[in-house]
Amino acid sequence: MNSFDFGAWDPEGTGGTTESVSWGDGRLHLGDRVRISPRRRADIMDIALHGRTAVVESIERDYEDIIHVALLVDDDPGKDLGALRQPGHRFFFGLDDIERLEPAEEQV
């Protein structure tokens, strides 16, 4: 028998979003600029996006209480589509896959 609690399941599909989350010795906020540095290098996108800078578009919490950060990559020609939440231009990473940009690096 399955122990899944159907009463806790949200069929609308939203685990929750937030405007900021604890991150390292501070907080990560919507609009913060970060550098992508995937630890696992699990797929080609991890390799292709490594070292790129990006803006935090969304901070989302899934049903297992794991934080996912949606990023808009600075040099993505389809960045405007990502801002509209169109497929293929928002890239999701964990908190351990991004690094805080130093103030001098934030100048684009």
Image (cartoon, rainbow, N blue to C red):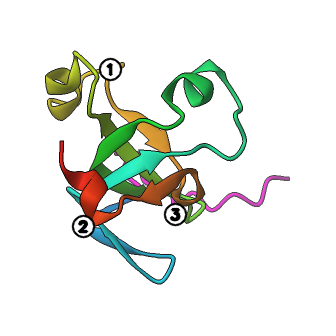
- The answer to whether residue 41 is left or right of residue 53 is right
Percent of width and height locating residue 63: 54, 58
Query: In the rendered image, which residue does mark 1 sit on?
Result: 87
- Mark 2 residue type: Glu
Label ID, residue 19: 2
Q: Is residue 13 visible?
A: no
Left or right: residue 81 versus residue 39 is left
Tell me how far mark 3 sits from mark 2, CA to CA.
Answer: 27 Å
* Residue type highlighted by circle 3: Gly
**Which quarter shows the C terminus?**
top left
Q: Taking 84 as reference, is 87 above or below it?
A: above
Q: Based on the displayed image, in which of its 4 quarters is residue 104 positioned? A: bottom left
Residue 21 pos. (x, y %): 38, 73
In the rendered image, residue 71, in percent from the top left (x then y), is placed at 34, 41
Residue appearing at x 20%, y 56% in the figure: 31
User: Of marks 1 and 2, which one's residue comes earlier in the chain?
Assistant: 2
Mark 1 or mark 3: name the one nearer the start of the chain.
Answer: 3
In the image, the segment drawn in magenta is 1-15
> SS class of the residue under badge 2?
loop
Disc on res. 7:
3
Q: Earlier in the sequence, mark 3 or mark 2?
A: 3
| 65 and 72: which is toward the camera | 72
Is residue 67 visible in the rendered image? The answer is yes
